[in-house]
Image (tube, rainbow, N blue to C red):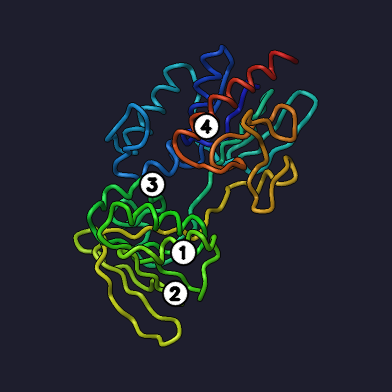
Amino acid sequence: MTDILVIGGGTAGLTAALYASRAGKSVTLLEKESTGGQIVFSPRVENYPGLPGVSGADYAAALTEQAESFGVTIEYAEALGVEADETGFRVRCDDGERTARALILAAGTSHRRLGLPGEEDLVGCGVSYCAVCDGAFCAGGEVAVVGGGNTALTDALFLAGICKKVTLIHRRDSFRGEESLAARLRRLPNVELRLRSAVTELRPADGTLTGIAVRNLDSQAEEVLPVDGLFVAVGQLPQTEIYRGFVDTDEAGYLIAGEDCRSSRPGVFIAGDCRTKAVRQLTTAAGDGAAAGLGACRYIDSL
């Protein structure tokens, strides 16, 4: 049995493990793929304080090495189920079972994809799911945003401030996001709204996105738009299926916890993008990790 088991190896999980291990607790971190999370796919991180211009892969590698240097044990396995018992918590994995006195759930989210051929290959090479993270790479260029919710609208507003032209593409005839945001976009001369439209094809050259095919869903007419970047904002999917019923979740499946990262179950803490909160960035993930790691230590000390 370990003192603290962290599930998820992104920024939140690695930070939580780092803080808990430095506090003298035995810590094991479980990651089903590779550490770092989605930031690994970002070619350049420019909004993390003190680390301007680092690549996502280099950032993730440095954080992983830092956690291991302070005694964190990283094991690559997928958590399949979790339950509480009289000694703490039992986690069933694809390669066996782990037990711990406290749990930190940092499962993260995945961006909903468009499902187009070649989409995964172009992530970080013209296709992005975070305008705040990657928009600066297209400054002065022409970009497109896909989506109709608040995230898509705010992404388009942000990009309109730094790009020559922004085309906002949405399948419906009206936006799901706030009308005040849509009204601001309509007033901008460098923003084009394409409603009842969908991206049907990605056009790359030499491994980089150079254009997209857009189809009008009413006329079925299709047009190829040259773009320097495509920003997809069609929703996120919290990776929390196995925890529903074990701790409280909201309607979308996010794990409910406040700024102290405490879940509805004593001894279980939530960190990172899978937690209910308004802002999901590297900085907020690191903050969650610190709060959850120290909170788990305090919980164990109180037993």
Q: Nearer the viewer, mark 4 or mark 2?
A: 2
- Identified at 36% across, 85% down, the residue is 221
Calculate the distance from the C-alpha at mark 4 to the C-alpha at mark 3. Answer: 22 Å
Q: Helix, strand or loop at disc 4? A: helix
Q: Which residue is mark 3?
A: 132
Calculate the distance from the C-alpha at mark 4 to the C-alpha at mark 2. Answer: 39 Å
Residue 123's quadrant in the figure? bottom left
Residue 79: x %, y % from top left: 60, 40
Question: Taking 82 as reference, is 24 above or below it?
Answer: above
Q: Nearer the viewer, mark 4 or mark 3?
A: 3
- Amino acid found under the numbered disc labelled 2: Leu
Residue 201: x %, y % from top left: 34, 71
- Neighbour class for label 2 at 10 Å: few (<14), some, many (≥20)? some
Q: Nearer the viewer, mark 4 or mark 1?
A: 1
Q: Earlier in the sequence, mark 4 or mark 2?
A: 4
Residue 286: x %, y % from top left: 48, 30
User: Residue reaching furthest left?
Assistant: 206
Q: Are marks 4 and 2 in contact (CB under 8 Å)?
A: no
- Identified at 64% across, 22% down, the residue is 296
Q: Earlier in the sequence, mark 3 or mark 1?
A: 3
Q: Earlier in the sequence, mark 4 or mark 1?
A: 4
Calculate the distance from the C-alpha at mark 4 to the C-alpha at mark 1. Answer: 39 Å
Q: Earlier in the sequence, mark 4 or mark 3?
A: 4
Q: Which residue is mark 4?
A: 13
Q: Which residue is mark 1?
A: 183
Mark on residue 195? 2
- Amino acid found under the numbered disc labelled 3: Val
Closer to us: 17 or 194: 194
